[in-house]
Amino acid sequence: MSVRFESIPQRRAIVDRRGLSDALAELLPGSGDTTALRQAAVALLKNALDIGRVEIARRLTEHPSRGSEAASAQAFLVDQLLRLTYDFTTKRLYPNSNPTAAERIALLAVGGYGRGEMAPFSDVDIGFLTPWKQTSWTEQVIESMLYTLWDLGLKVGQSSRSLDEMVRMAKSDITIRTGLLEARYVWGDQALYDEASIRFANEVMAGTGRAFIAEKLAERDIRHKRMGDSRYVVEPNVKEGKGGLRDLHALFWIGKYIYRVPTVAELVDKGLLTRNELRQFQKAENFLWAVRCHLHSIAGRAEERLTFDFQPEIARRMRYADRPGKSAVERFMQHYFLIAKQVGDLTGVFLAHLDESHAARGRRFGLPMIRRSPRKLNGFVLERGRLALPADDFFAKDPVRLIEMFALADKHGLEIHPLAIRAAARDAKLIDARVRNDPRANALFLDVLTSSRDPETVLRWMNEATVFGRFVPDFGRVVAQMQFDMYHHYTVDEHSIRAIGLLSQIENGTLHDEHPLSTVIANQLVSRRVLYVAVLLHDIAKGRGGDHSVLGAEVAKKLCPRFGLTPAETETVAWLVRWHLLMSATAFKRDLADFKTILDFVEMVQSLERLRLLLILTVVDIRAVGPGVWNGWKRQLLTDLFESAEEMLRLGHKQKGRAERIAAKQAALQEVLGWDDAEMAKLKKTLTDAYWIAEPSDVLERNARMIAAAADSPLSIEAQVYPTRGATLVTVYASDHPGLFYRVAGAIHLAGGSIIDARIHTTRDGMALDNFLVQDPLGRPLDEPQRLKRLESAIEDALANRHKLADRLAQKPLVRTRAEAFEIEPAVLIDNKASNRYTVIEVNARDRPALLNALAYALFQSKVTIHSAHIATYGERAVDTFYITDLIGDKIEGTSRLKALERRMLEAAGGEQADRKAA
């Protein structure tokens, strides 16, 4: 029996092999009908499998953190059923009283099952081994066994090979070799298995250790890239992701291959792990197996991705509880990421040992040889090109060296030896108040943070070694902290470090094409270190149960003087942290063509230096959220806000320059169009000042050509790709009438589009000129000619009322969105101070198909006029803002009317079927 199985308590309660064997022997006595016998055996074994699974699930419910025990129990259960199946097949179905030397079979467990570990719905990977080419008897036995296992509902991965085939294929295929590395005898001919083990060791493994390590590490790197290349993605893959089970398996595979050890514990004797690291390995393995087993159990299938749908239920099962400022699911996921980090630490130390003993002379696994030999290392030494310690007590003699090591690595472009990282992690507890307040330590830390080289990498090393969190305890509080939402892709610490990396790239000019404005102004800043510290601290107070911007500003006031910043710099950092969401909220949720929007924003910002700092902080904050969050439209909105605010700050707080800007836009448009003064005068007379301010030059040109082509037509619709915004521009030029907006919104939804912004204009001659930015559900432009034509036709049909819109929307199936995993209480905010001309309504709700249509219909029912709509989504949360007036162009006044409007909007925001009622 496997060593792993000996630790399983009360094994017979899971499956009683002896009792089942007796029951199988008594089936249909004297019958030679193999089909009937096999069916009867399947019924008996299936019942035993179900009972065993229920018992294992019950134990996991009672002891939800015993992951390794649950995984071993699953493998033990399958082992017993395989043995019974083998015995029944060879004794009752195809008995062979006098087998020849060729009629021998060894049944092997391979892969994860070979290790004696299985999740509830893991594949059963087995190998049938024969001495030579298969005989008719061995073929019958193998085929019958497979049919039995399939009938039991098991997902079987199987191979049937002779000894020679096994050796040949293991030599040529790394995946097969890895599976056989963990092969374990289950049943059948023991001598045949022993012979296979000897041949595998002598003919496959011998002399190939270095090549095996290199291949497994390359395979690991490819897997990490496929899974997001970070152990801090908020929906991690428990099995394949960085810091997951497969990384632990890879360590064991390499250790087993090199040192021929059967268990992880024996790697301690070989010096690859310390006793403490072995405990960390086993703790991480146990936790990850618990998560994986719960995940399979809840999903009812082999699910490896820990998505938002499953996280709350697993947190509940594993008995995490809410704490002030942090929900149970966030506490569970923080534990998960700390374990993933621990797996990463073990990997680094493990590979360091391999480097010393098995890498080629002068080289290291997966890393180029470093030829630089800097002289001034202040007592640190170089070991095979990496920064290392001269003695084990080097940090204890001067704990400031814990910071200095990372500063030297950054200064000289060196990697740090994993054993030095391990020593730093061990000695990080030496960082106390004295070290934190040491001016030299703080100066070194600030050098790393504001480095012009690669601060992101060095800060990540510092974080991995736990030195970062010890030196800046406020940062330590957000290490591995996730936010339970669909918007943030990374933990708070990873997000902050990535943002610093992006800031460095912008400053160095490597992101000029994506961020031309930020790149230019990054070199105009008075104090660049203010910006780096603000980026580090902008989310430092998340998870404390209050407004993290307000609380973070207080943290900044405490930390900045310690870092060595001046009082003026400290004040600026605190302001940036307090208002780091101001620019994005203004750009994405407010009408930038409304003068009051810019005025209110400028009154908060007050200086050009703050404006520049805030823009770059906003850009890196959004970019660091995750892939796909940043797009051309957001860049344009932030640029528009920056330029408008910059102009106002330069000219003063009076509405100067507006007439000049309009005149300049009109003159530039006339030049592009090549129109004469009469044609241009007609267009100017038709369109309001607000239109000229609101639309960028390229949209002005498209609209002008469309108006000219439409002549006296009552309706013109145009859909065209708008690549600079990463969207499709849909323009509707039609006779203005109530309900036009909600009909267009419904039609766009029916055509498979999602509106991300809407600018609604009424011309002086009673026409509506509406510009919509539309994307598909994956955030891409609709660019196929057929889809564009379908979009135009859908809008035309809706406005002509050819089909009842409500019926069409009702027939469109509601897609179950991932947002349904989150509870979001809808909220409606009505603001009569945000604009001089309009009432501003902001609606927060869970995002869902046709939400905008439902909200627009509610406004139509409320008899108001929509002047602009601004649609922002933050993962599962939608924030839709409308600038409205009553039907005669005044703000909405009166308490009862505002209350009625709020109630109607709340119903539309919260009701899943609200969007079905639009007429």
Image (tube, grey):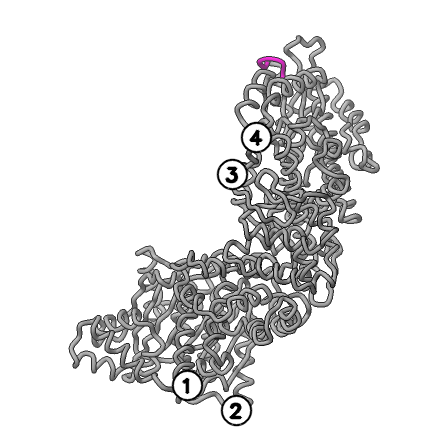
Residue on which the image places disc 2: 894
Q: Secondary structure at mark 2?
A: loop
In which quarter of the view is residue 777 placed? bottom left
Mark 1 / mark 4, whichever is N-terminal: 4
In which quarter of the view is residue 563 placed? bottom right
User: Distance of mark 3 from mark 2, alpha carbons?
Assistant: 72 Å
Relative to 320, say whether 855 is above or below.
below
User: Distance of mark 1 from mark 4, alpha carbons?
Assistant: 68 Å
User: Distance of mark 3 from mark 4, alpha carbons?
Assistant: 12 Å
Residue on which the image places disc 1: 652
Residue on which the image places disc 3: 368
Q: Foreground residue, 410 or 102?
A: 410
Determine whether label 3 and label 2 are within 8 Å by CB.
no
The three-letter code of the residue at mark 3 reads Pro
Q: Foreground residue, 170 or 61?
A: 170
User: Distance of mark 2 from mark 4, alpha carbons?
Assistant: 83 Å
Determine whether label 2 and label 1 are within 8 Å by CB.
no
Residue on which the image places disc 4: 361
Q: What secondary structure predominates along the stretch shown in magenta?
A: loop
> Which stretch appears magenta?
130-134
Circle nearer the viewer, 2 or 4: 4
The three-letter code of the residue at mark 4 reads Arg
Determine whether label 1 and label 4 are within 8 Å by CB.
no
Q: Is residue 512 visible?
A: yes
